[in-house]
Image (cartoon, rainbow, N blue to C red):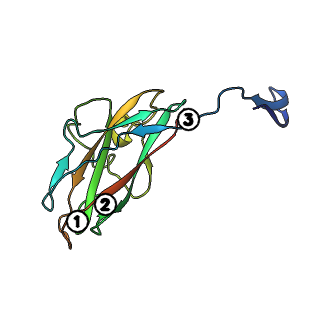
Amino acid sequence: MGQTATGFVESERYDGYLGFWNNGPVPVLCISTTDSLWNVDSIDVGETIAMSEGENLPIFNCSNVHINTGIRFMRTDTISWNISYSNSVDRFVLRARFTEDDTPPVSYDATYDYIKDVISWSTPILFGGQGWDIGLTESRNLWLQFIAPQLSTTYGPNTIVIEIAGTIFLP
């Protein structure tokens, strides 16, 4: 770490060199969770199911900085379903909320809680508002809601894989 100068600065209020000195620790990004899975067993087409108490996925900030969490759909392993904003033929909906509570959310927001196939970072609105600015040694609970396709062209066991990511929170 050291001082960096970007050149001479002239303005109405300041003449001099612009620079900074960073003598702090190197930021380390770390999130941890359990290896738990949410097993929804079998459900009917068009059915909605949500995590119950005790099925949540705890997310722990083991970084030396505050973090934001992000989520994205990765793939299905067996059946060729796609994630979507609304369910239809071979399209399902997966929603997520981060909370500090050990009890599941009462509701999920169709607009702000749905998971996409590109990463969406938590904000004060997205994913319940609790997945951003997670402090050092703090944790959040991730809760999921699944809405099955209205119709499926194939049936059988399936695994849906999502990615939970972290980034350094910058105020």
Q: Nearer the viewer, residue 117 or 75?
A: 75
Q: Is residue 26 left or right of residue 97?
A: right
Does the residue at mark 3 contact the one at mark 1 (Cβ under 8 Å)?
no
Q: Mark 1 and mark 2: span between their CA atoms?
A: 8 Å
Amino acid type of the residue that numbered disc 3 sits on in the rendered structure: Leu
Q: Earlier in the sequence, mark 3 or mark 2?
A: 2
Residue for badge 1: 88
Identify which residue is drawn at 17% across, 52% down: 48
Does the residue at mark 1 contact the one at mark 2 (Cβ under 8 Å)?
yes
Q: Nearer the viewer, residue 102 or 48?
A: 102
Count numbered badges in the picture.
Answer: 3
Residue for badge 2: 84
Q: Is residue 169 left or right of residue 123?
A: right
Residue 146 picture location, percent across and down: 23, 52
Neighbourhood count class around disc 3 (C-alpha, 10 Å): few under 14, some 14–19, many 20 upward: few
Q: Nearer the viewer, residue 53 or 14?
A: 53
Disc marking residue 170: 3
Secondary element type, mark 1: loop
Does the residue at mark 3 contact the one at mark 2 (Cβ under 8 Å)?
no
Secondary element type, mark 3: loop
Secondary element type, mark 2: loop
Neighbourhood count class around disc 2 (C-alpha, 10 Å): few under 14, some 14–19, many 20 upward: some
Residue 90 picture location, percent across and down: 25, 68
Furthest-left residue in this view = 44
Q: Earlier in the sequence, mark 3 or mark 1?
A: 1
Identify which residue is drawn at 40% across, 37% down: 131
Q: Mark 3 and mark 1: span between their CA atoms?
A: 38 Å
Q: Is residue 117 above or below residue 100?
A: below
Disc marking residue 30: none
Identify which residue is drawn at 32% across, 64% down: 77
Q: Is residue 111 left or right of residue 167?
A: left
Residue 126 picture location, percent across and down: 38, 42
